[in-house]
Image (cartoon, rainbow, N blue to C red):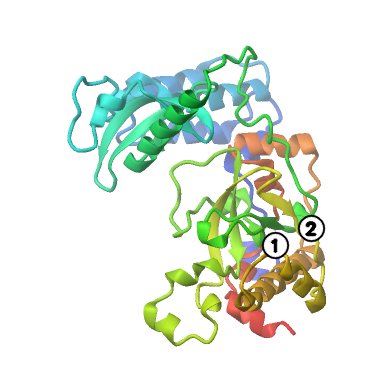
Amino acid sequence: KNYLNTQPSAKPIRIDYCDWVASNARNKNDLRGLELLFRYVYHMKGTPAMAKKILAYALQRPAQSSEERLDIIIKAATRMNYDPIVLKQDGWTIQKTDNPEGPLGGAIYIGRRVMWQKHEAVVVAYIPDETYGGLWKGVFLEDLDTFDMEPGELQMGLKKLENKTRQKPTRINAQSGSTRFAATAKFTVPGIENGIILAKPTNRASKGIMWPARVRNVVEGKLTADGKVRRNSSKNQIHVIFLAPFWNAQDASVSKMSNATDPYSVGPLFEYDTIEVSEYNIQEYTHNSISIEQLETGFKFLGLPKGVFARYLDSHRLAVSLKAYSLKHMSKNRDSEDQLLASASLTESHILSVKAPIFPDVVLMLPFDYILSKLT
């Protein structure tokens, strides 16, 4: 920290804490950092008694190597998310009721199956919540990963499962192990190391147009469109920032819209989004420089109003400038594909989020309109 303060041009290296401890472990007893973290959680006020037992057992259980020790620790941390005794001691209701509780239904949904991120899960617990009215905890049937659902998300999950059941009978997968992320776990696009891709926004106002976006590295956190941190994240999703989007003009104030000469450019110059990883949603960003003629030609095939072109041009100017900065000033990740996949597994993220560069704060904090004003 002192070195970074005295050397402002130095590039800080950020890495997930668990990954850092594991990568520096020399033997089975060299995971002291994780052990201290577990001990800290153990002594925290409010830690359920059963969680303390799971933590203590994970620390005392014999291991033959640092890899086995890390696996024990990760499994213990995972178990605490779904263990029924831990949930009950933490205030969750784990017993299904016969009648609805309040307007949201409460614990009556425990035991119901839902469709979440295109895979089946089961509701295992319910807890009242001041913000959302209530939260339901779901567990994926394949690998016991957990997630929380708000009332609207629960109803959507129930409806999606109902639609799937109506369309075709459920088939039992004879393979062992989790297959939820197998199809796209290794999916990547050329140039992801520079952080810029073409992606399809989830906002319907975008009309499904592929648009320039910056992929956020896993260490940057996981934000929703309104800038709030999500409770859950999927290993099959990446978090991006769309550059100069045209579809967010509807979020601008009425007075700003009425006084604007270009109604498509009144919205913010960025938009947070979470994209599901697939070849249909993510493509390589191929531009290394700005060619107005080339962009005009490509724009004609998008079917967008002519007024959108100014925003379209700004998005590519920002994308090319960020890509150029990455190519010129940022060192590339030299880890092997297996090491990157291991890091993605440890951070419960997709490999694209691990491969994406970590732009320095001085770049990320520059307003996009300022960057555009400096581009020729």
Pick whichever, 316 or 336, lies toward us. Answer: 316
Which of the image's four quarters has the C terminus?
bottom right
Q: Mark 2, residues whose alpha carbon is within 10 Å: few (<14), some, or many (≥20)? A: few
Q: Residue at x 49, y 85 (%)?
A: 260
Report how many numbered discs are placed on residues in the image: 2
Rendered view: 218 above or below 111: below
Whether tag 1 and tag 2 are in contact, CB under 8 A, the answer is: yes
Quadrant hosting residue 122: top left
Q: Mark 1, residues whose alpha carbon is within 10 Å: few (<14), some, or many (≥20)? A: some
Residue 64 in percent (x, y) is at 67, 16
Pick whichever, 283 or 262, lies toward us. Answer: 262
Q: Residue at x 54, y 53 (%)?
A: 202
Which of the image's four quarters has the N terminus?
bottom right
Element on which disc 1 rests: loop
Rendered view: 288 above or below 34: below
Report the amino acid beneath label 2: Ser
Residue 330 in percent (x, y) is at 76, 61
Residue 13 in percent (x, y) is at 67, 54
Which mark is drawn over residue 331? 2
Which mark is drawn over residue 11? 1
Element on which disc 2 rests: loop
